[in-house]
Amino acid sequence: MARPRAKGKGSRLLNELPSDLGAAFGIPTTEEGRRTHIRLHQPVRESNEDEEYALATAYMSHTIDYHDGIVEPRSYVEAVKSPQADEWKKAMLHELDAIYKQEAFEEIAHLPDPENKKAIGSHWVFKVKRDSEGKVIRYKARVVARGDQQREGIDYAETYAPTARMGHLRLALALAGKYGWEIQQMDVCTAFLGSVLRKDIYMHPTPGYAQLLQLAPRVGEHKPVWKLLHSLYRLKQSPYEWYHTLRQYLESLSLCLSRLDGGFFIFTNMKLDIRIILSIHVDDILLIGTHMLIALLKEEMKECFEMHDLGEASLYLGMSIEREQEKRSILLSQSHYVQTVLDRFKMHEANPVSTPMDPKIRLVKRSDNDEPCDKALVTGGSGQGSR
């Protein structure tokens, strides 16, 4: 994955915007407006729900969502002992290979300043990628940093990264249905590795990396640490660094950032009857527009980033996309997502009722001797419902 290269006036994407499409997404429609385009500012969202989120994530990552019985492991040990151990090992080796190719870290024998610099932990996160019908596409493994151990002001500063709003996404899809534009989807492989860190971050090597790479054990030596050169998942500043890396690249191709939504980039040329809208959600990119421009932009991005071309979009952010070209209509639904939630909480065979609990149950206040409830289950359920 190469760093974005700057492009001048020779870019194949021209820089013309009509007033109608540009105004819909808050794009300046004059040359002067583009020169004075105000940078999008958003407040940093503070979260005091880290504990609940961690519990919900741990619970959700270990439940069986589908009838094939595949469980997403919670640790390296669980992965290598699972029935799908060979698939998880391939996924982990692929992740480590990407990290080494990108030169995302340098290994050092010890911390340069142990009193002021602390090495954060790391672990694996495993995910099964599925299609809209729930069939397994591929197994994914990510080396994840313990961002909760970072110190604000020392290890990171800016953290906020905009993502496309669902209301604006529905507007873009409505335009695609009306004008018959294509809807294509791409996924950036190991997206955060494409952005350079501006702070010195030290991290303990991820569990099992020596065994996976068949490295000889170091007897009688201190365990080495990694000095991170590129972003990794779950670092506090990783979304911010990746977003601005991607934004810089897209703007070099003459795409304009929407003033209304930092997750949208737009380009239109009325003379050539080409137009495109990009919806950005971290590393998931939805391309909406004319065939020629989508094909051109895909080739441009593949030269700069390692991409998965997912073709025509059918499932995006848990939302199914179905279209009828003849009627120029698009149907959005979350039936697949709803079924997943029902399967997760063993409710797929339940019957609908007017009152979703026994009205004769007498509720009493729990005592200190009662067994505590499963906090992960409760937070997981509420998180699924409010997503």
Image: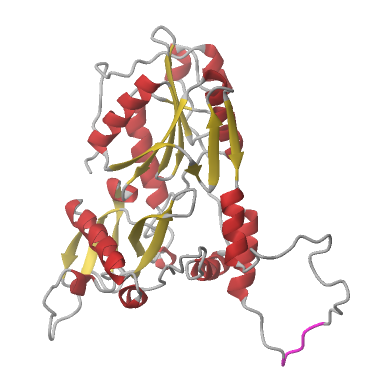
Majority SS type along the magenta span: loop
Question: Can you give x and y, in whole percent of width and height, for residue 231 in the image?
Answer: 31, 53
Question: Can you give x and y, in whole percent of width and height, for residue 218 in the image?
Answer: 13, 80
Asked if 327 appears above or below 245 in the picture, the reply is above
Residue at x-position 35% and y-position 20%: 292
Left or right of residue 89, residue 27 in this image: right
Left or right of residue 136, residue 66 in this image: right
Task: Look at the image and tell me in which quarter the N terminus lies.
Answer: top left
Q: Is residue 84 visible?
A: yes
Camera-side residue of 133 and 89: 133
Residue at x-position 25% and y-position 63%: 90
Residue at x-position 62% and y-position 69%: 346
Asked if 327 appears above or below 118 in the picture, the reply is above
Left or right of residue 153, residue 369 in this image: right
Colour scheme of the rendered structure: secondary structure
Q: Residue 221's image quarter?
A: bottom left
Question: Can you give x and y, in whole percent of width and height, for residue 91 in the image?
Answer: 28, 61
Residue at x-position 28% and y-position 46%: 194
Please count the marks in the image.
Answer: 0
Asked if 302 appears above or below 194 in the picture, the reply is above
Left or right of residue 254, residue 113 in this image: left
Q: Is residue 321 magenta?
A: no
Question: Can you give x and y, in whole percent of width and height, for residue 43 in the image?
Answer: 55, 45
- Kindly give the residue lying farthest to the top in the view shown: 271
Q: Is residue 260 visible?
A: no
Give the magenta-colored segment's residue range: 365-369
